Amino acid sequence: MASIIVSDVSVDIPIYDVSSASLRKMVLSRAVGGRFAQAGSHVSVSALKNISFEARHGDRIALVGNNGSGKSTLLRVLSEVYPPTSGTVRVSGRVSPLFDATLGMSMDATGWDNIYMCGQLWGLTRGEIEAGIADIVAFTELGDYLSVPVRTYSTGMMLRLAFAIATLRAPDVMLIDEVIGVGDGRFFEKAFARLRGVVERSSILFVASHADDILRLLCNKAIWLENGSLMAYGDIKEVIAAYRGSRGSDDVRMHGADTNTVRPVVPA
Amino acid sequence: MHTLLEVIRRDALSAFKAWRLWTMLAWNDILLRYRRSILGPFWITLSMAAFIAVLGVIYSRIFNVDVATYLPFLTLGYVTWGFIAQTVNESCGAFQEGERIIKQLRLPYGLYVFRVVWRNFLIFLHTIVIFVPVALVFRVWPGAHGLLAVLGIILLLANLNGIAMVLAILAARFRDIAPIVVTVMQILLFATPIMWPVSSLGGAVWIAQINPFYHFIELIRAPLLGDAPPLLSWTVALGSLILGSVLSLLLLNRAAKRIVFWV
């Protein structure tokens, strides 16, 4: 049974611009007796501040908040990609992060080759991949296209393939960052149906998205992040209402101008 | 000691166990580089062979040595050096190359280093074949000593893993490391007995002996030319292996939590 305990986690992300990443600064600061020590010490952004929460089996948690509020950082902490600067994260169960569905795809390899290559990267054994081939073929509807290089695919075809491979195995903990809001309406319908299947088989789900409709369909809880702080955690309706309420008249601009906002057609 | 064992268990061994993944990535890198090319990685073989043929004929005259002695010597030295230099240079980008994976999946960092070393080892296997016709034409028969070259290759691979890890970490943090390394390797091509025999140093043979790359090459070149490599070369290669491994593991232990922010 998967469980997640996040206690008092903060994450500072160091920013290295070109000059502070270079040796010159470091050598200089030594040579002049630390006069430039300030320049050598890097700037960091505190992306998460003292976050604490717990998630148990059956929790499907939506992450809401503005751009830069820490949603992606939190997902990366849960996938153990970002080590917390302070605090502890305890995750039990197999975690599968789905941030970049096309990860590991090679444009010059055929669809078949990519199924094996990406599958291995996602941690699947050859046996698991072979068992899932029929499923991938059915979902992607790529047919003979699977025998030609991915380079010749349209964006939608590529996405279908990537998505099918990435969601082949239902993990204990699934982390999703805005991957379903792309593709055309029909792809979205299929992807959404598939995702629901995966979600039902996995134990805990986190989805970061700006599309409230999708979140309401997939999730039962929500976490609202603002400037790296946890504002609310609880029932999805209440949290989203509080989040939207706090934005007041900003709401209109948010849906209109924000390029990250995704508003796909939700199947009835 | 305890931290060392912990890093070995957590990073080195788990990275090694993922061999399917890094051999796959390495092979895919080669396929990508030579997509739709008919000769594929054999282009490197061809260009190296041409270089060796021209240089071999001219330099054997300059150094006044028999071409039958010089060409096999040059072939082995230059091909091995190509492997070493390319691996060392490319290791500086090992983590940047894996950035997309590093930012999404928590995989052991050794994997990205093994990928670079393995990729170049596969290319080395493509280029070392140049020695076969050279050996046939000039009637070089390594004999039983030739088997020692296998040990030499294993020692070189092991050494390169340590060196590559250290450089990969440092170069991810300090972007000036990569050009420095390229420059150093360029100079070392001429400062290492590859194109000239070590005997031409006369009394200054220490210039070769303080250079670990000379010993790495000697452990492969000497046995394939039918000689046993000197004890000093074995000692240096083993010593640098221990030193490099310890250094790379300690550095990895220090840097592991920050690499994701550096790439």
Image: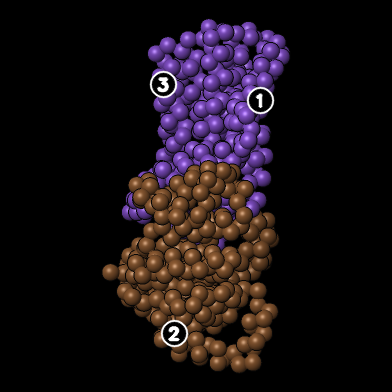
Q: Is residue B56 left or right of residue A12?
A: right
Dots 2 and 1 on the same chain: no
What residue sits right under mark 2 in the picture?
Answer: A236
- Dot 2 surroundings within 10 Å: few (below 14), some, or many (20 or more)? many
Q: What residue is drawn where x is 56% and y is 74%?
A: A265
Using the image as rendered, state which of residue B219 and residue B20 is in the foreground. B20
Q: Is residue B235 left or right of residue B70?
A: left
Q: What is the distance, in whole Å, between disc 2 and disc 1 at their CAs?
A: 64 Å
Q: What residue is drawn where x is 56% and y is 77%?
A: A210
- Dot 1 surroundings within 10 Å: few (below 14), some, or many (20 or more)? few
Q: For residue A97, which numbered disc appears in the image? A: none
> What residue type is disc 3 on?
Leu
Chain assigned purple: B
Q: In what element is the residue under mark 1?
A: helix
Q: Quadrant of residue A154?
A: bottom right
Q: Is residue B24 left or right of residue B193?
A: left
Q: Is residue B7 left or right of residue B55?
A: left
Using the image as rendered, state which of residue B38 and residue B25 is in the foreground. B38
What residue sits right under mark 1 in the picture?
Answer: B47
Q: Chain of mark 1?
A: B
> What residue type is disc 1 on?
Ser
Q: Earlier in the sequence, mark 1 or mark 3?
A: 1
Position in image of residue B166 (x %, y %): 51, 47
Q: What residue is drawn where x is 47% and y is 73%?
A: A207
What residue sits right under mark 3 in the picture?
Answer: B148
Position in image of residue B30 (x %, y %): 56, 38
Chain assigned brown: A
Q: Chain of mark 3?
A: B
